[in-house]
Amino acid sequence: MSKILKTIVVLYFCFSSLFAKEITLKEAIDLTFENNPTLKAKLNDFKSAEYSYYVSLNSYYPKISFSHGFSRSGGEGRLPSNSFSASASLSQSLFDYGSIISIKTASINYEIADLQLKNYLIELRKSLYTAFYNLYFLGELVKVQEKIVEIRKSNADLISLKYESGMESKGNMLYAKAQYEMAKLNLAKSKRDFESASNTLKSIIGISDDDILIPKINDLKEIDKVDFDIKDIDTFVKKNPNYKIYEKNIELAKLKLEKEKLDWLPKLSLSASKSYSGKVEFPDKESWSFGVSMSIPLFSSGITYRKNSVLSLEKLLDTSKQNLKNYYINLKEQIKTSYLDLLNAIDTLKTYKVLLLANEERYEEALIKYMAGKMSYVDLENMEQNLIDSKQNYTNYLKNVYMKKITLDALLSEKLERY
């Protein structure tokens, strides 16, 4: 049964590899801009806010209407008669402070929509880069596991030969074979993790084909420094789209308060019309009108409405200011923490790189000693395990550096852009 299972696993991965497709980060970004449905929805929201702003401008544009009517009437003792009418009218708001505030509000909402789009592009960059590099490093881990399988197989074959020649114990021979089987199991798990991560990347990009994506990076550079000066942290905080949205919310709160305080201001409008009426299709009986009107809403909503509404809006304005202050403090601390985490990750990677080189050399030396009969299998296996752990740790710590860098980039407002 185990042989059948192994055959199925081998065939599965061979078959899956037929549908593998290499993809660069640039290609992933281009595909995301073309396919990601959430990004398209955000772009629609942005355009909707833009059109809403243009709609608000109409409150100060002239309003023109035209009408044409026909009626026929009659009754007992009266002959039926026709009546035609045609009229045109124009109205123009001369002063309405509420309309002015509405236009300003629509303008700020348009700016907020732009900031929300930028904020989503920051989040999308973080998600895409995380998925892409996570998939890449899982691929590197698969390569490490494949190398481990080679080492375990070589050892199992070697120990089996030594056992057959009476130079090694049966227990060590069986243990070496068990280690080889465990290595194959870990490799199979890593490949499944890789396929799952490929699906995650495809989901972010917005595609759903059956291809297994393989990140293509010609020259992965080790990140050995951070291009960020902690002294500039205030600049980065204040250019963050979310921070600016909080600022815009304060502006909106101020406008609402200002509108309520000045709600008593008069509204001034102009209107004019001209009409014709008569018994024929093109009547010639002319009439016209022209007028200017003013209204003053002294207590249109109640005697105490304005006072309490102003007090309520003042509290909301203060809340908006406190929210901005809270976000500023939190974002500043997040950037500091992320920056320090990245420095720690870089230093850790440098140390484990040295350790990996040392364990590679020690393993080569141990293998020579074992072949010469100067080292036991247990000691060789320990050296081998140290090498395996070092390879896996180095790959994981290199991945950790990239993940920390992506997190810091997001906090510094790096958004997804095409190359």
Image (cartoon, grey):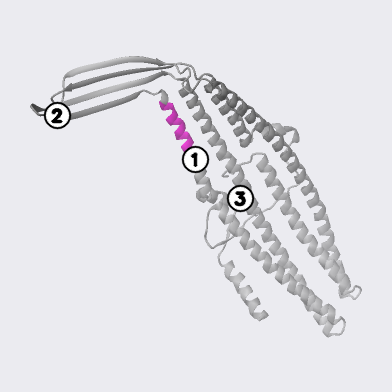
Where does residue 328 sit, x and y in percent of width and height? 69, 33
Q: What element carries label 1?
A: helix
Give the residue type that dot 2 points to.
Ser
Q: Mark 3 points at which residue?
A: 128
Q: What element carries label 3?
A: helix
Question: Quick one: quadrant of the C terminus?
Answer: top right
Q: Give the range drawn in magenta.
A: 46-58
Q: Is mark 2 on a helix, strand or loop?
A: strand
> Is residue 227 something that shows in the picture?
no
Q: Name the residue under label 1.
A: 45
Magenta stretch encompasses residue 54: yes
Residue 186: quadrant of the picture:
bottom right
Q: Which of marks 3 and 1 is in front?
A: 1
Any mark on residue 73, and which?
2
Closer to the N terminus: mark 3 or mark 2?
2
Q: How far apart are marks 3 and 1 (CA)?
A: 21 Å
